[in-house]
């Protein structure tokens, strides 16, 4: 008896297209829920309808801007990861050309396969081609996966963002 040939999964890391929109917003919402699950809930309960609207608008703008790049990773054409990068300026320094990495997310079933690393490599190449000198990213101190990932990619913490409610 011959067994059917195993198909090799096809992984593709690429700039997002408009048709990826719903999947990207879905991934952003999943990431947002994770972020909102960490204490101290400074801004109160999440309003998911408002967050969803904000993300749809943000995605539309981001895809039109030349100073940003939204990446998506597909596995056999199914979106399994995303990463966004926005060029900005750190004025008052010799090398103000910097970029922010945000909304980095990989499907829980596909982690530790190098997907986030591949997206970061593409973002780095794009940023370099745009004259960017440095990259910045932020994560919650309780997010151990993110902490391990960013440190493994050579990022060094330089600022802590703290919050306090006034009520
Ligand atoms: C953080 C995250 C994006 C990493 O994605 P990933 O595709 O699994 O990461 P990679 O496979 O590219 O990891 C590259 C390296 O980072 C480090 N790393 C990543 N995840 C790690 C973990 N959970 N524990 C320890 N090291 C880890 C390792 O050095 C890894 O290399 P190795 O697997 O050869 O040891 C993913 O865990 C995720 O989506 N988490 C939920 C969303 C999130 O927290 N996003 C970050 C917001 S800033």
Image (spheres, helix red, strand yellow):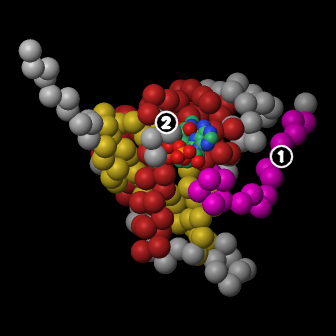
**Which residue extends farthest left?**
1
Residue 116 belongs to magenta span: no
Residue 80's spot in the image, x, y percent? Answer: 39, 36
The residue sitting at 53% across, 74% down in the picture is 132
Q: Are marks 1 and 2 in contact (CB under 8 Å)?
A: no
Residue 157's spot in the image, x, y percent? Answer: 74, 57
Q: Check disc 2: other Cα within 10 Å, few if <14, some if 14-19, many if 20+.
A: some
Q: From the viewer's side, name the closer residue of 98 and 122.
A: 122
Confirm or reject: label 2 Cβ below 8 Å from ligand 1. Answer: yes
The residue sitting at 90% across, 30% down in the picture is 167
Q: Check disc 1: other Cα within 10 Å, few if <14, some if 14-19, many if 20+.
A: few
Question: In the figure, is residue 25 to the left or right of 143?
Answer: left
The residue sitting at 20% across, 32% down in the picture is 7
Q: From the viewer's side, name the closer residue of 154 and 21.
A: 154
Residue 164 belongs to magenta span: yes
Q: Which residue is mark 1?
A: 162
Which residue range is magenta in the image? Answer: 150-166
- Label 1 element class: loop
Q: Quadrant of ligand 1?
A: top right
- Label 2 element class: loop
What is the tally of numbered marks visible in this picture?
A: 2
Residue 42's spot in the image, x, y percent? Answer: 79, 34
**Which residue extends farthest front?**
1
The residue sitting at 63% across, 77% down in the picture is 96
Q: Which residue is mark 2?
A: 111
Give the numbered dot on residue 65: none
Asked whether the viewer can see residue 60, the reply is no
Q: From the viewer's side, name the closer residue of 4 and 40.
A: 4
């Amino acid at each position: 008896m011959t067994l059917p040939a195993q198909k090799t999964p096809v992984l593709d890391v690429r700039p997002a297209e408009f048709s990826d929109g719903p999947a990207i917003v879905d991934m952003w919402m999943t990431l947002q829920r994770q972020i909102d699950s960490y204490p101290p809930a400074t801004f109160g309960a999440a309003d998911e309808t408002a967050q969803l609207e904000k993300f749809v608008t943000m995605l539309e703008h981001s895809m039109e801007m030349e100073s940003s790049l939204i990446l998506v990773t597909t596995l056999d054409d199914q979106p399994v990861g995303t990463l966004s990068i926005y060029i900005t300026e750190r004025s008052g320094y010799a090398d103000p050309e910097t970029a922010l990495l945000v909304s980095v997310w990989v499907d829980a079933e596909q982690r530790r396969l190098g997907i986030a690393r591949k997206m970061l490599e593409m973002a780095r190449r794009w940023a370099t081609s745009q004259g960017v000198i440095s990259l910045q990213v932020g994560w919650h101190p309780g997010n151990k996966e993110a902490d391990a990932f960013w440190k493994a990619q050579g990022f060094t913490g330089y600022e802590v963002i703290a919050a306090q409610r006034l009520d």
